[in-house]
């Protein structure tokens, strides 16, 4: 019975003329060009480009296995507008063939096989394509969203996309090619690859190192996996990106810039010694240029939290903010993991001091001990008004201020006019006078000693004279650590964040300096 059935079926197929030579053969020869691109009213620009580049035959090849990301007409129109040309200008581009081959994979990949963060190599292997598959099911190739998927033929599949891909070096490529694995994984997890692979964008990316992410995980008491699972991950990452390209040479001390996450600004510091900081994070490598922006490497992750500096800026304490900027203290006070109490003089308080000194605000900002004056207003712990008691309170300068609760709250001779303005890294109490430390506090501080980086993380380096031993003191004068010096570097591991004095000794030569541990 089985043989009879088989014989009958074969005879029937020959009789109808569709075995090998008929309709089935026609279906087996469908291809991505003739049966999808050339017949689509939404892809006439792409068809014209393929013809102009002489790639029709390659896409008709019945032996090929292709995936084509096919920009629609709107995609070509948008690219032409962005480049200040028209479709004819695009077709005349000598790079047209390379651009089109960057849209084609040499294997068939249906949309269901795309995984978030996959990096694939197209026929033009000058660059890779970075794939994104969002939690809502949207698929992107670089910045281009798939708007019609799985148009299948016998030699491959076509996915229509809403933008033209360009094989240029983007800020994402900088991160990938230079081993920023934690940052890249975070960008992929937050589904931000489309934003940073846009070839027509102009971005500045402040890129934390792997060590910076490890330190953040430690500070938060979690792991890298915990950071990646944080629902605020995308907000943290977009806080590291500006919507315009900014070279390091264009950064000025005290610049306040708004990143893509505009929940808070970034405060930039450019020290007189040349170091650049973004909030508390130091730029360790600058000006890694891409075709769609520039990357500056950071030694810490910046967080869009409200700091004591933000309290001063947001509440129009312009004189205090100007003084903090001039004294190059923004990195210290923007540390999101700091614990500060700031006694913040009003603008009127600075004006009164200027009058008393026979100068103006500019004269105040040029005081040689401006940094000491400001540090005298900061306590290295959080003290709400309910925590204050009569007596002495040590400041970051090492001198005490005196709290008097007899009639309201007084700090030395200044009255607290507004208390308990909370920030994520401390609290601010507004006072009506500028506090002045003892004039001779730093008479033995050696100005020529350069410690870097300052603020420091794990290693502090001495630039200048050679010293044999050191002693680290807290600002109350208590010895924290003492040892010999090798290679002019000092190991700060195990040292709590804060401000410290350091005694440097070489025979009878003894000098002091101050540094901040992050």
Image (cartoon, rainbow, N blue to C red):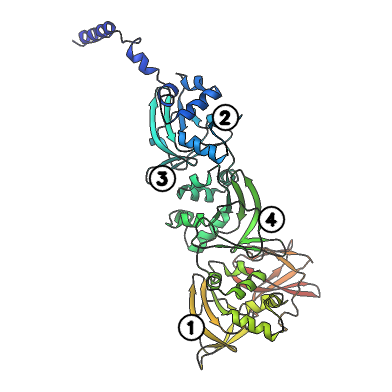
Please report whichever mark, 1 or 3, sits nearer to the chain's N-terminal start: 3
For mark 2, what is the residue? 96
Gap in angstroms between the C-alphas marked 1 and 2: 68 Å
Gap in angstroms between the C-alphas marked 2 and 4: 35 Å
Gap in angstroms between the C-alphas marked 3 and 4: 37 Å
Q: Please give the label number shown on residue 134.
A: 3
Gap in angstroms between the C-alphas marked 1 and 3: 47 Å
Quadrant including the N terminus: top left
Please state which of the two labelled residues, at mark 1 or mark 4, is closer to the viewer.
Answer: 4
Secondary structure beneath label 4:
helix
Please report whichever mark, 1 or 2, sits nearer to the chain's N-terminal start: 2
Name the residue at 74% across, 70% down: 469
Please report whichever mark, 2 or 4, sits nearer to the chain's N-terminal start: 2
Please state which of the two labelled residues, at mark 2 or mark 4, is closer to the viewer.
Answer: 2
Q: Are marks 2 and 4 in contact (CB under 8 Å)?
A: no
Across and down, in percent, residue 297 comes to 61, 53
Gap in angstroms between the C-alphas marked 3 and 2: 30 Å
Q: Is residue 5 left or right of residue 187?
A: left
Please state which of the two labelled residues, at mark 1 or mark 2, is closer to the viewer.
Answer: 2
Secondary structure beneath label 2:
helix
Please state which of the two labelled residues, at mark 3 or mark 2, is closer to the viewer.
Answer: 2
Across and down, in percent, residue 60 comes to 46, 20
Q: Nearer the viewer, residue 180 or 289?
A: 289
Q: Nearer the viewer, residue 452 or 506?
A: 452
Name the residue at 80% across, 73% down: 507
For mark 4, what is the residue? 249
Secondary structure beneath label 1:
helix
Please report whichever mark, 3 or 2, sits nearer to the chain's N-terminal start: 2
View extreme (right): residue: 508
**Quadrant in the picture for residue 176:** top right
Q: Nearer the viewer, residue 56 or 171?
A: 56
């Amino acid at each position: 019975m089985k043989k009879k059935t088989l014989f009958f079926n074969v005879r029937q197929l020959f009789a109808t003329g569709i075995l090998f030579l008929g309709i089935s053969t026609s279906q087996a020869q469908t291809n991505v060009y003739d049966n999808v691109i050339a017949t689509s009213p939404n892809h006439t620009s792409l068809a014209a480009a393929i013809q102009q580049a002489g790639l029709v035959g390659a896409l008709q090849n019945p032996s090929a296995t292709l995936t084509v990301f096919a920009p629609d007409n709107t995609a070509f129109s948008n690219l032409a507008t962005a480049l200040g040309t028209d479709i004819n200008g695009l077709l005349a581009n000598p790079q047209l063939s390379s651009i089109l081959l960057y849209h084609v994979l040499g294997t068939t990949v249906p949309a269901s096989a795309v995984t978030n963060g996959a990096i694939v190599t197209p026929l033009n292997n000058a660059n890779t394509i970075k794939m994104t598959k969002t939690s809502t099911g949207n698929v992107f190739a670089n910045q281009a969203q798939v708007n019609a998927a799985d148009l299948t033929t016998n030699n491959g599949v076509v996915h229509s996309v809403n933008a033209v891909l360009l094989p240029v070096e983007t800020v994402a490529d900088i991160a990938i090619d230079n081993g920023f694995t934690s940052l890249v994984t975070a960008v992929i997890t937050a589904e931000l690859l489309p934003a940073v692979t846009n070839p027509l964008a102009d971005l500045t990316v402040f890129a934390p190192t792997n060590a910076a992410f490890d330190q953040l995980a430690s500070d938060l008491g979690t792991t890298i996996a915990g950071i990646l699972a944080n629902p605020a991950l995308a907000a943290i990452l977009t806080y590291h990106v500006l919507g315009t390209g900014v070279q390091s040479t264009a950064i000025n001390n005290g610049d306040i810039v708004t990143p893509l996450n505009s929940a808070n600004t970034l405060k930039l510091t450019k020290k007189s010694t040349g170091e650049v900081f973004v909030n508390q994070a130091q730029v360790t490598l600058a000006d890694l240029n891409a075709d769609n922006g520039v990357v500056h490497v950071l030694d810490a992750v910046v967080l869009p939290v409200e700091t004591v500096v933000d309290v001063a800026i947001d509440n129009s304490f312009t004189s205090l903010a100007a003084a903090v900027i001039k004294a190059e203290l923004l990195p210290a006070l923007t540390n999101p993991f700091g614990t500060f109490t700031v006694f913040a003089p009003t603008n009127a308080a600075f004006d009164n001091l200027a009058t008393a000194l026979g100068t103006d605000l500019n004269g105040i900002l040029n005081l040689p001990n401006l940094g000491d004056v400001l540090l005298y207003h900061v306590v290295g712990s959080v003290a709400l008004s309910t925590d204050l008691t009569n007596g002495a309170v040590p400041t970051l300068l090492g001198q005490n201020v005196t709290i008097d609760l007899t009639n309201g709250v007084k700090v030395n001779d200044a009255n607290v006019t507004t208390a308990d303005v909370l920030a994520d890294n401390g609290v601010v109490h507004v006072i009506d006078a500028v506090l002045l430390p003892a004039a001779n506090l730093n008479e033995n501080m050696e100005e020529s000693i350069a410690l870097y980086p300052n603020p420091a993380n794990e290693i502090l380096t001495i630039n200048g004279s050679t010293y044999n031993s050191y002693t680290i003191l807290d600002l109350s004068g208590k010895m924290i650590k003492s040892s010999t010096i090798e290679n002019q570097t000092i190991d700060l591991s195990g040292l709590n964040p804060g401000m410290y004095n350091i005694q440097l000794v070489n025979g009878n030569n003894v000098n002091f300096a101050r540094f901040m541990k992050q």
